[in-house]
Amino acid sequence: MAATVFSRIIAGELPCAKVYEDDLVFAFMDAGQVNPGHVIIASKAPVETLMDADEATARAMMVAAWRIARAVREAFAPAGMTILQANRAAGWQTVPHLHLHVLPRHAGDGVDLTWPRKEPGLEKLKELAAKIRL
């Protein structure tokens, strides 16, 4: 994988405001703060998407998100919280390095996430579930 802005931050080549680090993840304040307390959690492994990560990294990212979200709640008292993880351009990923956002939310903050809701019915849902059931 080619170097990304996140891999350069993790390597110490670019400055950041670090929030958390362990063996598998690195978290820092998003330079484009949507609201105060907006944190990015990136994998230390140079992988592009969640599906490319190993299970240990996926687990570590969610544990870090849980810890950081609780700290953000305590420090900034947001009205809500969005934890967002996107994969590839069609999935809204803007940096090709596995990461997620811990985004404190407030009414009227300008963040919008919408999609056309489809209701295929229970039989179709069962058919879809059968294709991915673990």
Image: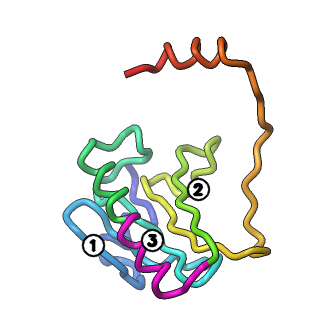
Front residue of 56/71: it is: 71
Residue toward you, 114 or 8? 114
Q: Secondary structure at mark 3?
A: helix
**Disc nearest the viewer among 2 and 1:** 1
Mark 1 or mark 3, earlier in chain: 1
Task: Say which mark, if any, is on residue 94.
Answer: 2
Give the percent coordinates (x, y) of residue 134.
37, 22
Q: Dot 1 corresponds to which residue?
A: 21
Instruction: Name the image quarter holding residue 54.
Output: top left
**Amino acid type, mark 3:** Ala
Q: Which residues are magenta?
A: 65-78
**Left or right of residue 98: residue 90:** right
Farthest front residue in view: 122
| Residue 123 image position (x, y, % from top left) | 65, 12
Which of the two discs, 2 and 3, sits closer to the camera? 3
Residue 30: say if magenta: no
Mark nearer the N terminus (2 vs 1): 1
Q: Is residue 88 left or right of residue 64?
A: right
Q: Residue furthest bottom?
A: 75
Question: Which amino acid, mark 1?
Answer: Glu
Q: Residues within 10 Å of mark 2 (few under 14, many from 20)?
A: few
Name the quadrant containing residue 23: bottom left
* Element at label 1: strand
Farthest residue, direction left: 23
